[in-house]
Image: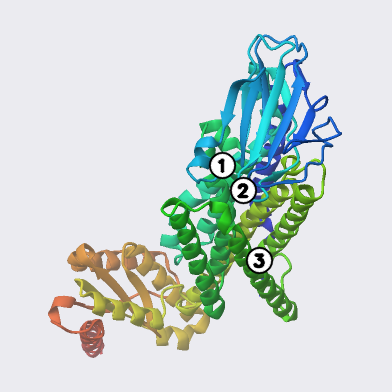
Amino acid sequence: MKFWDYSRYDKLAAILLLIISVIAIFFISDTFFKPGSGIYSLNDGWEISLNGVPYSSDSLLDAGLGLIDEGDVVILSRKLPDFKLENPCLIMYSIHALVDVYLDNELIYSFGHDYYENDRTVPKRYNYIALGQDYLGKELRIAISGTRTRSFSGASPITVGERRDILTYHISGMRSNIIIGDFLMILGLALMILSPYMVIYHSNDLRLFFSGLISLLLGLFIYSFYGLIDLLCNNPSLNTICEYSSMYNIPTAIIGYFMSISTDKLKKIFRALFVANVLVFLSVFFFTVIASRRIFEFTPMLQGLALFEAIVCTVIIIRAAAKLFKDPDFRLISSDNVFSAGLIIFTLLSVVDIFRYNYTKYFSKQGESSTTIAFFTGGAVLLVCSLLISYLLYIIYNSNLQSMQSKISSLAFTDPLTGLANRARCEQVMDLLTKERTQYTIISLDLNKLKQVNDTLGHHEGDRLLSGFATILSDCFLDANLVGRMGGDEFIVILTEERALSTTKRIHELYSMISDWNHKEQVFQYSASYGYAYSYEVPSGSAQEVYMLADSRMYEMKREHQSDKRKEVIKNA
């Protein structure tokens, strides 16, 4: 059976339009984030030493300092040239390090000592250092001290510019990360706000919530990795908390998404992993905040847990794919397949960035300060797009499936000739009325002369008599709770609450409509016998008993009609 409606591909165009809009904003932003011309790179001409041992290279990018451990001190010094700047500002990046900047032995900037002295993690930071107007010819000395084992490697590039231009320069270099981070976080929040609707009205479906959570965490990690939260809030500690919290919880959110789309045994496995992840993170948070442990101390454990879960998820995806390929109804473009493809691509790109990061930190001369997460960022966008497309495919498929099920249900409960509810549906409604104990009226009707029309005019005219009478009933009882055909020439009407109070008036309206139809009909005449009963007439009884009472009154009326006709025939004879 075909459930896919290709005409609904237009819904995917909305996602494509959103992605194109983000790309357009990226290119347009180059106009707004264009720094002035007074930006100078200050990477050469330095005297570099590590723990008092001088290096032969004078370039920050080629110094090859190696890994800096706790207690190691890197000293950078040089004479400042004339930059022809009114308010020069220096920017440099530090990674878990103490930074002290001197101008002719006068301390002009210091960072990280309060964290280190209180045994807290010294955050990463982009340090903005004002040089003042009287800088020409003075010696600039920067002392960078490690605060933990393998604090960082290499030396950060240093840039000088006007205070009003240096921030623009910094933002311009990261505008793609800013736009992508904004896009992912805003989208994530929007999806999470919409998710309660799915939980309430779609059988506790949590996939939209976890899609939003994944998007939010990815955007938050990109923002904090590049120090953008510190840039906005001037709070490096908050930036560090956001970076580690988002990094540790991205796998948890992905496990939660798997939990929301899985069933039976797989759902239990993913639920156990999800609960374990949450408990581990809460424990880490407790030891970091309450016990004053440094958050990076838990990184190996959490990375090991994430690696184990990645292997579990990969095995499950491969096994599920193998089963699907054997299914004769296999569809390549399906909700789960799109998500799985996006997750695999994201994982591969993230692994590439992990190798790049470790190679740059441990083997490259430039060191850790030059690392980026460009592949991770691209993978994050692809993963979120795959989540959106997966969700749309899920909604479209379920919509088509529900439509088909509705049609099947309609066929199961509809009389094919008259279009009214069939006997099964009538009995189902009567069972509901019995359980609800509401006030209602049941009208039982019998269409007269059906056998006579069938015998003399043929079954075609008999069918026309039935369908015509069904139309009369439907038009007369538009507000009825049920109009149905019990079988043969027997019909039923059910009215509840206020509608049940004017039954006699409604019967008169029915006979008036029958009279109007008879004036137009040339072949046969419509007539019907009826009987009705109120629910209160059968106290503590079932709707079936109320129907039997109405039916007995209908047959009593039918017998009276037949008796009157016999008397009329005898009289005429």
Name the residue at 78% across, 41% down.
65
Q: Nearer the viewer, mark 3 or mark 2?
A: 2
Instruction: Return the x and y of residue 270 as percentages of the image width and height.
Output: 55, 72
| Three-letter amino acid code of the residue under disc 1 | Val
* Above or below: residue 277 compared with residue 176: below
Question: Badge 3 is on which residue?
Answer: 307
Instruction: Return the x and y of residue 109 as percentages of the image width and height.
Output: 59, 25
| Three-letter amino acid code of the residue under disc 3 | Leu
Q: Secondary structure at mark 2?
A: loop
Q: Report the Cα–Cα distance between label 2 and label 1.
A: 9 Å
| Three-letter amino acid code of the residue under disc 2 | Arg
Q: Residues within 10 Å of mark 1 (few under 14, many from 20)?
A: many
Q: Are marks 2 and 1 in contact (CB under 8 Å)?
A: yes
**Any part of residue 205 in sight:** no
Q: Nearer the viewer, residue 479 or 155?
A: 155
**Quadrant into which the N terminus falls:** bottom right
Q: Nearer the viewer, residue 352 or 28?
A: 352
Name the residue at 50% across, 71% down.
271
Sequence-earlier tag: 1 or 3? 1
Q: Nearer the viewer, residue 314 or 68?
A: 68
Question: Badge 2 is on which residue?
Answer: 148
Q: Report the Cα–Cα distance between label 3 and label 2.
A: 25 Å
Q: Residues within 10 Å of mark 2 (few under 14, many from 20)?
A: some
Sequence-earlier tag: 3 or 2? 2
